[in-house]
Image: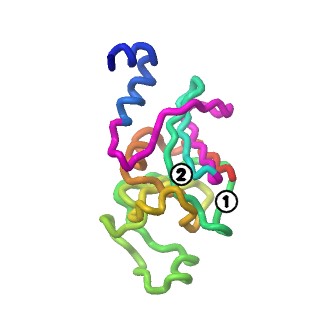
Amino acid sequence: MKNRTAAALGFAAALALTAFSATEASARELVTFDDGYTAGTIVVKTSQRKLYYVLGDGRAIRYPIAVGRPGKEWAGRTTIGRMEVNPIWGPPAEVKRDKPSLPDLVPPGPHNPLGPRAMLLSGTEYAIHGTNRRDSIGTRASYGCIRMYNEDVVELYDRVSIGTPVVVQQ
């Protein structure tokens, strides 16, 4: 049955679906997406709290995310400017001002708010990254960054590169 399904969907879709044998906590899914963006574009819809990685041919992978708190959200177009595996986190000045007890640097590991991967967005102070707060996914929790489940950010990180277009919509 799986082979017939793969043949019916085509090779690319079958590869994408195979990647979705992720843990039950991950809710990424292959969806219909025909918003006019080219394959390889990341589209963030903050009102939905969803990130779409456009595959083309009217399809995308949809990931649940956490977005900026009220007053911290933003919208615009940019690209991935830097990519980091096991990033070190230094709280931005605004975060440090609100939470002065935070350390100046947090090393990689379970207490790091960036999780195992970070894709920094050019011309902004924001990133698409993992999280040490799984329960924040689906909420407005950040200072403007896009948080993903750690297994999802690792999967997305492997699909993109520096220069990948990113569109953030309200």
Query: Closest to the observer: 121 or 154?
Result: 154
Q: Residues within 10 Å of mark 2 (few under 14, many from 20)?
A: some
Residue type (three-letter) at the residue carrying disc 2: Gly
Q: Quadrant of residue 54?
A: top right
Q: From the viewer's perspective, is 84 left or right of 146?
A: left
Name the residue rendered at 45%, 42% in the picture.
Answer: 28
Image location (x, y in percent) of residue 20: 38, 36
Q: Earlier in the sequence, mark 2 or mark 1?
A: 1
Name the residue rendered at 55%, 29% in the picture.
Answer: 59
Whether residue 78 is visible, yes or no, is no
Q: Quadrant of residue 16?
A: top left
Q: Can you name the residue that lies furthest to the left here?
A: 109
Q: Can you tell which of label 2 and label 1 is closer to the viewer?
A: 1
Measure the C-alpha gap from mark 2 to mark 1: 17 Å
Secondary structure type for disc 1: loop
Identify the magenta region.
21-47
Q: Which residue is mark 1?
A: 74
Q: Main secondary structure of the magenta part?
A: loop
Query: Closest to the observer: 88 or 145?
Result: 145
Q: Which residue is mark 2?
A: 81
